[in-house]
Amino acid sequence: MEQKQSIEQFKGQARLPSFAIPKHYDLHLKLDLSACTFSGTVQINLSIVEETKFLVLNALELDVHQVWFTNSHGQKYHPCDVVLDGDDEFLVLVFDKALGISEGVVGVEFSAVLNAHLTGLYKCAYLDGGEKKNMAVTQFEAVDARRCFPCWDEPALKATFKIALDVPSELTALSNMPSTNEKFDGDVKTVYFEESPIMSTYLVAVVAGLFDYIEDTTSDGVKVRAYCPVGKSDKGEFALNLAVKTLDLFSKYFSTPYSLPKLDMVAVPEFSGGAMENYGLITYRESELLFDPLHTTAARKQRMAIVVSHEVAHQWFGNLVTMEWWTDLWLNEGFATWISYMATDILFPEWKVWSQFLQQTTGGLVMDALEQSHPIQVEVNHARSVLEIFDAISYEKGSAVIRMLQAYLGDDIFQKSLSSYMKRFSGKNAKTEDLWSVISEESGVKISEMMDDWTKKQGYPVISVKAKDHILEFEQAQFLSAGLLGDGEWIVPITISLGSYERRKKFLLETKSSEVDVSDLVSSFHTKLKNKEICDEQLWVKVNVEQSGFYRVKYEDKLAARLRKAIEHNNLEATDKFGILDDSHALCEACEQSLSSLLCLMDVYRKEVDYIVLSKLIDVCYNIVKVASEAIPDSMNELKQFFINLLMFPAEALGWEPVPGESHFSTLLRAEVLQALVTFGHDKTQNEALDRFQILLNDRNTPLLTADTRAAAYIAVMRNASSSHKEGFEALLNVYREAGTVQEKERILRYFASSPDPDTVVNVLNFFLCDEVRDQDIVFGLCGISLECRETAWKWMKENWDLILTKYGAGMLLTHFVRDIVTPFCSNEKAAEVEEFFASRVHPSFAMTLKQSIEQVRIKARWVQGLRQEQSIQELVKQLAGKK
């Protein structure tokens, strides 16, 4: 009884007790890919730092067969009890006598099933000459190394690893380090790998499969390989080239060389995320690593560059220097996101990715305006809830806050600080405070107070701006999409441009409100323009210049009117035109601004040609349609006509076919504009799309429907598909089945559920669950469900919930079902219905996603109610729809 009570002390704890610290793992895994099982032995060198009768480590879904402990004198002990706890995911070894403070080795023999849920050590299928065969892959981040072998599965408990792997002799076996030896025994071989440097368990990796590879070497002599499906190694060249260049780039930027002798990148057929930065062995979804000039869109090529840069950056930020606990996950993800844009901008300056970085910032702003958001530095109290903080706060807000700090300190000081941070914490763990301390030392600027505001507090401010003569008045309040103004106060780096980008001012807003005298900027403007009336009209004020700060801005009416004029006369940079529209849309959603004023602002973007601005304009159109269809259904045709009118200028300029030598942005923009016109029901575009689809059916490589324009055709096909007109649906299904590339299959899945017909959408949703669609690819299908079939998808999910849970497990993939099917609703009744359904079904892996999704439904419900009360909105929509 006493022993049971003693074990109880370890239950419900976020972290393992600190009796013992692992130093080295000897791990031997034996894979049986026919039976889909594995067995293994792990011997862990420990330092016991506190006398204890218990050794507590992590294990989950493992069968433990034998356990022993050998002390520093070679004496072997067997525990008197071995307790596996599935809820708390630990393994407790109980000894009769206390183990004294010393060194020792704990050994465990174990076995388990190769699961199909894309976590831990899992199986996935590949084709070998048309025959389906199994391979094995690991995905340990965040807390799934414990599914593969018993270990101290926490980022701070770093150790060295020596790994051996038994695999079928015809397969390639890979791990973090190069192989040193292979021994053959019949049709099985044992592959031995070099000992690794010190690293966290979540970065350990093994892969066993059939691949072709290509290789190159960095200027420092690091061998880099891209492992691709057999016969497709040429598709890995783009990623290989990027990895070599970014390894060199980051080695110089951090003044710290890459720390391993090799870097392998592997395209695996089934993978829950996009890619994973395992030390020396980065794993990717096939679509993130394989580049096909004929089937890869410009947007996907750009994303590939950012993803490869992101994962290579992690070899420093995350692998060499690791966060101390998941609370500081953003140190990994925020920095890797920020620096991946920096690297991509250096390698492809013509893509101007820093302007597109604003899409990252917006992702963070949207999530952080929820009451159910969380600070960047967030407490993690349950292992499974770690998954939920791989979100827009850790990635998008984290990277935006870094960008803001870089702009505040300057590039050189920032780079020097990061180099010092790398050197000081190399091979160690760090907290956010450690980084601020190094930056403060290097820059001479005490940044911790300002930065704590952004990383330890939830949310961000909206800055209200008014002008009285030559005084600008600023006031801050926490911005919430629910329309409530919170009490938070931040130290905000404010930047201002007045009438021209040559007239700028910056200051720190450190209190609730402040006034700034801009008479020096105004007088220089007056000197230039003699007529004061014209001068005042042209004296626009833009706050948060180029959107470098993580906050929103609300202008009084006269300042907003001047900015509209400045947009119309093309006086503003694309980043600022983006920011004004983005802030205006957010204020409208929060019912802080009327839809009428937002539509009038959108109207001045008719002649817009910049990709980043038009992409934002299209997003805003889509979001308005979601709520307007409920609030003002009688005006929907006219509203869509207005949106079509907004896009006709770029649509006519771009056409359907690429022009030789056109810019990267033209290609990106053509894709988005055509998709929007088809979605909003523009007859001419729809008919053209359907005609081109017919040509594609006869010639899969037709230049009349490129990788970038196919999505528009697929939407047109599905928008016209119904239970009585199945031809288009069946033809597209056939294209999916015959597609030879993962990019083409992914593209079709994204738009397969865009039909307005409920029966068709149910057929598509059932198809998503069949064996023809890989589990990992469900994420593409769910995000494309048509607005008209929200209710259909929700009913289908409720009916199939148990099947979905069994098939996908309670991991990352499940969060997509919750988010993508719940958030499109916009009524309080539906929010209550969702709450009721999940009351007995919630799981830690999606609990926060569920709360955030329900909150977003309630935010839209409030917006719908606001729109219904808005005077003369229908008259304005009619007027705008008729304006050519």
Image (tube, grey):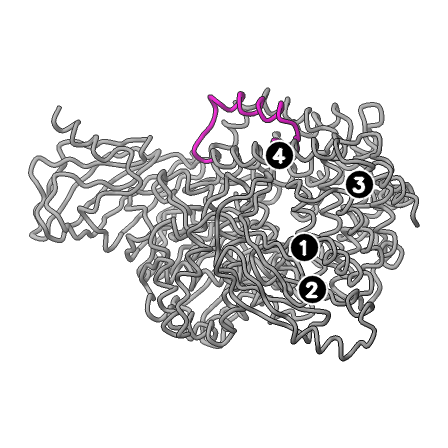
* Mark 3 residue type: Thr
* Mark 1 residue type: Tyr
The magenta stretch is 818-845
The mark nearer the N terminus, 4 or 2, is 2
Whether pointer 2 and pointer 1 mark residues with C-beta atoms closer than 8 Å, the reply is yes
Instruction: Please state the horizontal and vertical placement of residue 511, each as a whole percent of the image.
Output: 48, 58
Quadrant where the N terminus is found in the figure: top left
The circle on residue 823 is 4
Mark 4 vs mark 2: in front = 2
Kindly report the distance in space between the C-alpha atoms of the residues bearing marks 3 and 4: 19 Å
SS state under label 4: loop
> Does residue 56 appear to the left or right of 704 in the view shown?
left
Q: Residues within 10 Å of mark 3 (few under 14, many from 20)?
A: many
Count up the numbered dots. 4
In magenta stretch: residue 233: no
Kindly report the distance in space between the C-alpha atoms of the residues bearing marks 1 and 4: 29 Å
Q: Residues within 10 Å of mark 1 (few under 14, many from 20)?
A: many
The mark nearer the N terminus, 3 or 4, is 3
Instruction: Please state the horizontal and vertical placement of residue 344, each as a whole percent of the image.
Output: 60, 66
- 497 w.r.t. 362: above or below: below
The circle on residue 92 is none
The mark nearer the N terminus, 2 or 1, is 2
Kindly report the distance in space between the C-alpha atoms of the residues bearing marks 2 and 3: 36 Å
Give me the residue at 76% from left, 35% from top. Answer: 870
Kindly report the distance in space between the C-alpha atoms of the residues bearing marks 4 and 2: 36 Å
Would you name the residue on which mark 1 appears? Answer: 555
Q: Residue furthest front?
A: 469
